[in-house]
Image (cartoon, rainbow, N blue to C red):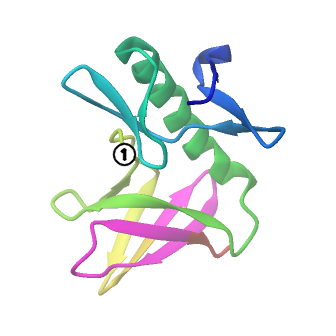
Amino acid sequence: MPCFDFTDGIITFKENGKTCCLGYLLTLRGKVFDASMGEVDVTEEQADKHNKVFDSMIVKGLDTCAIGQGHTFYYKPDTKQVITWLGTVIGKTSVNAKQVTVIYNEKTFRGNLRKSDDSIFLKRTQ
């Protein structure tokens, strides 16, 4: 198990000499889990703060996306919104047939809806 650092609320660790960041963390029955690492040795409070900071970093990362780059989010068909894992709304969303367009900070992102998926990859188009 790596040694975790909690600087600025985000949980990082060293791997092969590089600083890595945990992804979203899930708390279940008093234990905290990362999708890649399984159970991790952090408190529920640390996990909650990490998730909030991580969530805002994911959204802010869209500001630096070049055309063709993007990120995976979730689509809520009942509200026709694109959200993060924590439920943060990404931007103004429009839906046309099977394609979703999101305007975030004057940048346009598009993704294709699939019936079997609740996640959507948004790619910057302009």
- What residue sits 62% from the left and 16% below the top? 6
Quadrant of the rendered image containing residue 39:
top left
Residue stretch in magenta: 102-122
Residue 116 vs residue 103, the one in the foreground: 116
Q: Which residue is mark 1?
A: 85
Q: Residues within 10 Å of mark 1 (few under 14, many from 20)?
A: some
- What residue sits 46% from the left and 52% below the top? 91
Quarter containing the C terminus: bottom right
Q: Position of residue 55 (x, y in %)?
A: 49, 37
In the structure shown, which secondary structural element does the residue marked by tag 1 occupy?
Answer: loop
Outermost residue, bottom side: 97
Q: Decide: is 38 above or below 64.
A: above
Q: Position of residue 2 (x, y in %)?
A: 62, 29
Q: Decide: is 97 above or below 34.
A: below
Quarter containing the N terminus: top right
- What residue sits 54% from the left and 27% below the top? 53
Q: Position of residue 25 (x, y in %)?
A: 40, 35
Q: Decide: is 97 above or below 51.
A: below
Taken as a whole, is the magenta stretch helix, strand or loop? Answer: strand
- Residue 115 part of the magenta-drawn span: yes
Left or right relative to 74: residue 30: left
Residue 60 vs residue 25, the one in the foreground: 25
Residue 19 vs residue 89, the one in the foreground: 19
- Residue 23 part of the magenta-drawn span: no
Outermost residue, right side: 17
- What residue sits 48% from the left and 43% below the top? 37
Q: Callout 1, which amino acid?
A: Trp
Left or right relative to 106: residue 98: left
Number of numbered labels in the structure image: 1
Q: Position of residue 86 (x, y in %)?
A: 35, 38
